[in-house]
C-alpha cells in the first residue's frame, strides 16, 4: 500500500510516485529507535540549512544556494503564496517568503526561490553514483516517535536527524529499510541506531559526509508500509529518496550562476547610463 509523507498527499501524486518508482510505496518522518529528544538539532550548525516549509500541511526543504530550496515536488504541490521557509540558526528562528517554484517535469522534485538571501551558502549536490552501502544522515521536520510515529507527543515542526544506510537504488530512487534494534536486552545507543522518515519529512535531505562537508544524496519522497495497516513508518518499512545525482543537471539549471546575476546587473546599469537620443 502506498503512503506519502504528507497527510494531504493526493491520489494523483500517489499514482505518480508509484509510476516513477515502479512499485508500491509509502512515505515517512524522522522516527527513531531511542529517544526523539536526542535527535533534535537546534544547536547543530552543520544542519542549519535544513528548514521547515509551511506548504501542504508542513514539509521540509534544504538550501542549495543562499536563495534556493530543494524539496519534493509534492511538498509544494499546492499554492506557495503566503507560505514560508523557516530556518533555525545561531540567531534563532527566521522565516523567508516563497516567491517561485520550479517543478521537475517527471520526478517528485522541486526548487523554490526565496524572497531574499538567507546568508547561508547552501549544500552541494552529490554527483557520485556510489551511494549504495553508504551511511546517510536523514533530516526532517516531520512527526517523530519511538519505533512508529507518535504525532500527539512529537508533532511536526521540530528538526530532527538520524542515521541509516542505503540498501539499493531503483528507478531514480534510493531505498533504505528501518532495522529494529537487536533484541539482546541492550539499550540502543543514541546516534548509532537507525532512524526513518515520517509524515512532514517530505522534501528533506539525506546527506553523506565528503571531505568534512555534508553533500545531499537524496530527497525524501515516500515510505513503504510493509504490513499495509496504515501505520508508518514501523520497523521493517522502507524509505524512498529521489536519487539527486540522476537529476543534478536539472537542479543546477534552476539556480542562476552568480556570474550571470552580476552581468545582468551591470547590463541594467549600462542601459541606465546610455544617453537619450
Ligand atoms: Ca537500514
Ligand atoms: Ca504499518
Image (spheres, rainbow, N blue to C red):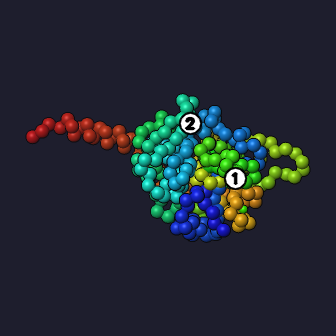
Q: Secondary structure at mark 1?
A: loop
Quick one: label 1, few (<14), some, or many (20+) residues within 10 Å?
A: many
The answer to whether the residues at label 1 and label 2 have Cβ atoms under 8 Å apart is no
Q: Earlier in the sequence, mark 1 or mark 2?
A: 2
**Disc 1 versus disc 2: nearer the observer:** 1
Residue under the point 88% across and 45% down: 186
In depth, the one of 193 and 250 nearer the eye is: 193
Residue under the point 87% across and 52% down: 183
Instruction: Examine the rendered structure and indicate whether residue 203 appears above or below residue 158.
Output: below
- List the single residue furthest toward the top: 91
Residue under the point 61% across and 47% down: 156
Q: Quadrant of residue 245?
A: bottom right
- Residue where numbered disc 1 is placed: 149
- State which image quarter holds ligand 2: bottom right
In depth, the one of 91 and 169 nearer the eye is: 91
- Residue where numbered disc 2 is placed: 88
Quick one: label 2, few (<14), some, or many (20+) residues within 10 Å?
A: many
Amino acid at each position: 500500500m502506498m503512503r506519502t509523507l504528507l497527510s494531504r498527499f493526493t491520489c494523483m501524486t500517489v499514482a505518480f510516485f508509484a509510476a516513477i518508482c515502479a512499485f508500491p510505496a509509502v512515505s515517512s518522518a524522522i522516527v527513531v529507535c531511542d529517544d526523539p529528544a536526542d535527535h533534535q538539532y537546534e544547536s547543530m550548525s552543520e544542519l542549519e540549512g535544513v528548514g521547515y516549509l509551511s506548504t501542504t500541511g508542513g514539509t521540509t526543504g534544504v538550501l542549495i544556494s543562499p536563495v534556493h530550496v530543494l524539496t519534493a515536488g509534492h511538498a509544494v504541490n499546492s499554492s506557495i503564496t503566503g507560505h514560508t521557509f523557516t530556518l533555525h540558526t545561531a540567531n534563532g528562528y527566521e522565516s523567508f517568503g516563497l516567491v517561485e517554484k520550479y517543478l521537475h517535469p517527471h520526478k517528485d522534485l522541486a526548487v523554490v526561490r526565496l524572497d531574499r538571501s538567507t546568508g547561508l551558502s547552501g549544500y552541494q549536490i552529490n554527483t557520485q553514483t556510489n551511494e549504495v552501502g553508504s551511511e546517510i544522515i536523514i533530516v526532517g521536520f516531520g512527526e517523530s516517535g519511538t519505533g512508529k510515529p507518535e504525532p500527539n507527543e512529537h508533532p511536526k515542526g521540530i528538526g530532527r536527524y538520524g542515521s541509516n544506510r542505503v540498501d539499493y537504488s531503483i528507478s531514480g530512487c534510493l531505498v533504505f529499510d528501518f532495522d529494529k534494534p537487536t533484541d539482546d536486552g541492550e539499550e540502543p545507543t543514541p546516534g548509532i541506531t537507525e532512524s526513518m522518515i515520517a509524515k512532514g519529512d517530505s522534501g528533506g535531505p539525506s546527506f553523506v559526509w565528503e571531505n568534512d562537508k555534508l553533500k545531499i544524496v537524496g530527497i525524501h519522497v515516500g515510505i513503504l508500509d510493509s504490513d499495509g495497516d496504515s501505520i508508518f513508518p514501523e520497523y521493517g518499512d522502507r524509505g524512498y529518496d529521489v536519487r539527486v545525482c540522476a537529476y543534478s543537471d536539472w537542479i543546477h539549471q534552476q539556480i542562476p550562476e552568480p556570474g550571470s546575476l552580476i552581468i545582468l546587473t551591470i547590463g541594467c546599469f549600462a542601459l541606465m547610463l546610455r544617453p537619450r537620443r
